[in-house]
Amino acid sequence: MNTTVNELVSKLFLEEWSKEIFYDRYFVQCEPTICSYSYIDNANPLYVATTLLGLYGGLTVVLSWWCPRIVKFVRRFQIYYRQKRRVRVAPRTS
């Protein structure tokens, strides 16, 4: 009752701070049927730019490693397949 406004402001208008949390009492009193949350995240230009650069860098590294191996495998397969299908013709000797 004799508290000044300055003191109330410094104490954030709380005379007593309770640190005990009773989740079971909260759920008994409120009886929520669904617990969920949502937030709206606006993509700023810096976030978009860094994400695109990261994707580009990652794809560059991965594709520069995989593409030569895939091409090499396909060429080996083609060479093997062509050699298998090759028909050899020998001249007849009489």
Image (spheres, helix red, strand yellow):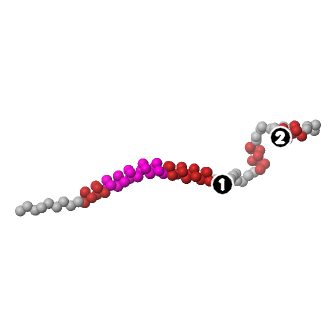
Image-based side of 73 in relation to 30, left or right? left
Please determine whether, in this image, residue 72 is positioned above or below residue 17: below
Q: What secondary structure characterizes most of the magenta part?
A: helix
Give the quadrant of residue 77.
bottom left
Q: Residue at x 66, y 53 (%)?
A: 41
For the record, the magenta segment spans: 59-77
Residue 14 in view in this figure: no
What's the amino acid at mark 1? Answer: Asn
* x and y percentages locating residue 44 in the rendered image: 64, 53
Give me the disc on residue 12: 2
- Residue under circle 1? 42
Give the quadrant of residue 91.
bottom left
Image-based side of 9 in relation to 85, left or right? right
For the N terminus, the image quarter is top right
For the C terminus, the image quarter is bottom left
Which secondary structure, mark 2? loop
Residue 46 in view in this figure: yes
